[in-house]
Image (cartoon, rainbow, N blue to C red):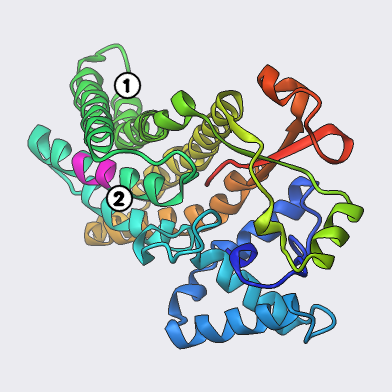
């Protein structure tokens, strides 16, 4: 993330008002823009150099070019480590990566084996995305990653196979109702297991806590600049389990908010389209149309879901553990990275 770049001058958090929901939506839409994936190493380095020039005072004010550079850097680098997030696991690639798995889960006539295989693939992707974008102040051991992975896969497969077997037995429902429910099964498994996956993959954060930092006042920032330091040099006040619980819970909720419209809207539209004479005559277009509906819905929903909570979350220090009482910064607040 741009905050990890050298320079004493702090970059503005965003060109939008992050204290409002729609401001966060517009900000997040930039971070999830798939066009950032097309920029190579040379373009990234150029963007980083522009931001360093600003932070070192060589550029006096933010320009459209600088905002574009900041958006590129923020969507590519992890906010805690400053290292590049592997491309398929970036939030700007979230929709495209998930579309591949979704196409597999929508394959007609999968059966239990196929369902399990694609749920394993889906949860493998979820594990990778959650791990790559988690708060890195309490890293997971490989044994914990493996344990969380197998638990998440088991849960998703159980939900998917269980629902697949239950729906055909609902004889009291009309055939059309059973058809709709059967279309919702893959996404119900994705929604429930996706939220569980977040808690499992980031459980270590809740057990050990994550770093919290004081919210700096203007005077504090000026003092840092005078000392030749940046906001990245501010020391952690310690690790808070309560902050970690808030961070993980909010991320899990945002995952459900993201998957729920995708779980409902495309299947219901497709059922209506399948009743048309054109699609009855051309059933081979069913899967491409379904994937197109999912793609459009996913891109529309992702910024709305991720913006539900600020990524850099502020809270009163007195609401955390006793050791943080009275240690907050401006207005008694502390800030922590909730991850994505």
In the image, is residue 200 above or below residue 285?
above
Q: Crowding at label 1, few (<14), some or many (≥20) Cα neighbours within 10 Å? A: few
Q: Which residues make up the magenta segment? A: 120-124
As for residue 122 lying within the magenta part, the answer is yes
Vertical placement of residue 203 versus 142, above or below: above
The quadrant in which residue 194 appears is top left
Q: Which mark is residue 183?
A: none
Question: From what the image shows, is residue 154 above or below residue 313?
Answer: above
Instruction: Give me the disc on residue 102.
Output: 2
Q: Badges 1 and 2: C-beta atoms under 8 Å apart?
A: no
Q: Considering the whole magenta stretch, tell me its main secondary structure.
A: helix
Helix, strand, or loop for circle 2? helix
Q: Nearer the viewer, residue 205 or 71?
A: 205
Q: Secondary structure at mark 1?
A: loop
Left or right: residue 24 compared with residue 176: right
Tell me the quarter of the picture where residue 254 sits. top right
Between residue 111 and residue 72, name the one nearer to us: 72
Residue that extends furthest to the left in the rendered view of this protein:
113
Q: Residue furthest front?
A: 227
- Please name the residue that numbered disc 1 is placed on: 174
């Amino acid at each position: 993330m741009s905050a990890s770049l050298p320079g004493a001058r702090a970059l503005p958090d965003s060109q939008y008002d992050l204290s409002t929901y729609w401001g966060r939506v517009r900000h997040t839409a930039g971070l999830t823009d798939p066009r950032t994936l097309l920029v190579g190493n040379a373009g990234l380095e150029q963007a980083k150099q522009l931001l360093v020039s600003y932070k070192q005072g060589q550029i006096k004010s933010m320009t459209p070019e600088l905002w574009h550079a900041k958006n590129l850097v923020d969507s590519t680098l992890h906010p805690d480590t400053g290292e590049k997030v592997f491309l398929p696991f970036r939030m700007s690639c979230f929709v495209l990566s998930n579309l591949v798995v979704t196409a597999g889960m929508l394959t007609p006539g999968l059966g239990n084996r196929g369902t399990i295989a694609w749920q394993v693939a889906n949860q493998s992707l979820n594990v990778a995305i959650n791990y790559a974008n988690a708060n890195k102040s309490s890293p997971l051991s490989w044994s914990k990653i493996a344990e969380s992975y197998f638990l998440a896969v088991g849960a998703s497969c159980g939900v998917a196979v269980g629902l697949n077997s239950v729906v055909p037995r609902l004889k009291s429902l009309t055939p059309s109702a059973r058809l709709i429910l059967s279309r919702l099964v893959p996404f119900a498994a994705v929604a429930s297991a996706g939220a569980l996956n977040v808690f499992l993959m980031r459980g270590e954060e809740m057990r050990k806590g994550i770093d919290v930092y004081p919210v700096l006042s203007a005077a504090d920032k000026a003092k840092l600049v005078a000392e030749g330091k940046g906001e990245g040099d501010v020391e952690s006040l310690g690790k808070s389990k309560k902050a970690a619980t808030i961070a993980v819970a909010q991320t899990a909720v945002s995952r459900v908010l993201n998957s729920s419209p995708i779980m409902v809207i495309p299947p219901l539209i497709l059922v209506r389209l399948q009743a048309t004479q054109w699609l009855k005559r051309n059933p081979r277009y069913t899967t491409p149309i379904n994937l197109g509906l999912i793609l459009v819905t996913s891109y529309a929903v992702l910024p709305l879901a991720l913006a539900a909570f600020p990524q850099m979350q502020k809270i009163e220090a007195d609401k955390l553990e006793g050791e943080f009482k009275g240690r907050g910064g401006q207005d008694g607040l502390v800030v922590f990275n909730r991850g994505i």
